[in-house]
Amino acid sequence: MSGLLRTEPYIINIGPQHPSTHGGMHVEAVMDGEEIVDVIVHLGYVHRSVEKIAESRTYTQFIPYAARLDYMATNLPAWGYAAAAEKLLGLTVPERAQYIRVIMGELSRIASHMMFVGSLAIDLAATTGLLYCLRDRERIMDMFEMTSGQRLLASYMRIGGVSHDLPEEFFPAINSFLADVPRMLEEYNGLIIGNEILQARCNGIGILPAETAIAYGVTGPNLRASGVDYDLRRDDPYGFYDRFDFKVAVAQKGDCMARLMVRLEEIEQSARIISQALEQMPEGDIIGKVPKVLKAEKDREVYHRIESAKGELGYYLLADGTDKPARLHVRAPSFVNLMVLPIISRGGKLQDIITNIATLDPVLGESDR
Amino acid sequence: MIPNSNEEAINQILNSMDHRVQPYEDPFFQGLRVEPADLLQLMLLLQDQAGMNYLADITATDRKEEFEVTYHLYAIPDNQMKIVIKTRVPRDAAELPSVFTVYPTSDWQEREIFDLMGIRFSGHPNLVRVLLPDEFEGHPLRKDFRKEG
């Protein structure tokens, strides 16, 4: 009988309008019965051509565009851009501003990772998990509002520093937040990680071997979850990261659970960095001596990279002697990381694609640019 | 085992390629210029013999008569060497070899350059647009792309 049965591959479309794609992304799952044969990713639904826009904006004018790349961790892409521009223009940043950047950057990382945990939970139908994470992330949004006036898309970074000093009410808010972080993590551990269904959907699913991760340029928490101990904050330090004592979170298995656990540990480590930054931060200027019109000499170029919430976020800037860049290129970790989605999904079941997308943690504003 | 990347290994590669690679000054990287025909060989040697296992970024710039393609290479986990490779292709024959066989991460990054800058990568397994729709005409990052609206 079995010789007469013939199967043929068929395609299931996920997205572009589907909550589990975390933005506008279209995924074609090529199935043979219940098994995934291949995954084809279609990007570009959120393409705004920001690299082209940058060529007609002054160096300063690009900051709000940068803040909208990874809108889940707004201060990190803005910081990366500001730092790249400073390198190109040869500007220095005052000490206090460096510390404020670390504090706001790490808060953004925590916000992004909380969204990761919450959205993974809701993608696996554990709606309550999302609500707990959003409740805690809300306190970070409040702090962004205090400092910059904006909650989600704080264009708080400036070339040479930051836009405002930290207000008085910021300090009690951050201190109580940091004091509550262990309790939040305990809650996530019990409520979300302790959930049997979540464990079954994450353990051993979407395994990404270390060699594959490096070959495909996967960086950030996704790389560290595959057992590669590599974090730009420690291994290619920028800003003041060499002044803090923190542990780089690494997990070994490379599966969805490992990617989740690395993020949870990073929340804890980010909180540690913030407390040290608050202790060490001196009084002083929040922005350096920056000329009114910023011009870099013709043909000068930089590639500056930071450890963003999603991985290596790099900016390539080329100057043409005017107040606008000749070329800006964003090396977006979300874009590069997504390349392994087909690799980690093949041979699995349809439902695993959802978990794999959620744990690769792409943000489409950044991948599509 | 990943061999340690170091200057000695780089120098050996430069010697073995017999002046077909030109070092240049860059404040943050070891800069190398190479002709498109020698690009793949240089990449292979850097990966095999100098431990440059991580191609972080590929980007292209419009230089009027030519396009310049830039590659940023690092080694994971030690960051001892930072290498930038530059190569140029003429505007009217914008094609260079894909480095996909050496660095699979170039897959979508080369597609992006093909899509937005209109440079073809020979030997790429699936050279189609990645961000813009397939039927889109033109390559927006070229300086002569007409902006409307």
Image (cartoon, coloured by chain):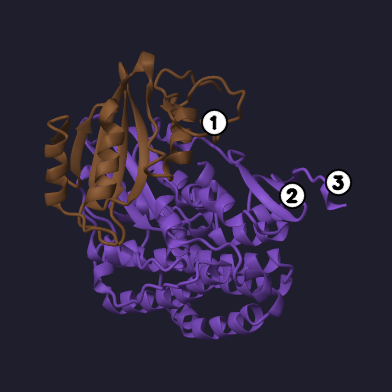
Chain colours: A purple, B brown
Cβ–Cβ under 8 Å for marks 1 and 2: no
Q: Is residue B117 above or below residue A22?
A: above
User: Mark 1 is on which residue type?
Assistant: Arg
- In this image, A53 relative to A349: left or right? left
Residue B5 appears anywhere in the view: yes
Q: Quadrant of residue A292?
A: top left
Q: Nearer the viewer, residue A197 or A116?
A: A197
Give the distance between the C-alpha atoms of the residues marked 3 and 2, in whole angstroms. 16 Å
Q: Residue at x 45, y 77 (%)?
A: A174
Instruction: Say which element carries label 3.
Output: helix
| x then y, percent, for residue A47 | 55, 38
Instruction: Please give the residue where the numbered disc 3 appears in the rendered image.
Output: A4
Instruction: Please give the residue where the numbered disc 2 appears in the rendered image.
Output: A32
Query: What is the number of the mark on residue B25?
Result: none
**Which chain does tag 3 point to?**
A
Q: Quadrant of residue A277?
A: bottom left
Mark 1 vs mark 2, foreground winner is 2
Instruction: Please give the residue where the numbered disc 1 appears in the rendered image.
Output: B129
Cβ–Cβ under 8 Å for marks 3 and 2: no
Q: Is residue A295 above or below residue A331?
A: above
| x then y, percent, for residue B124 | 46, 32
Q: Nearer the viewer, residue A14 or A127?
A: A14
User: Mark 2 is on which residue type?
Assistant: Asp
Give the distance between the C-alpha atoms of the residues marked 3 and 1, in whole angstroms. 40 Å
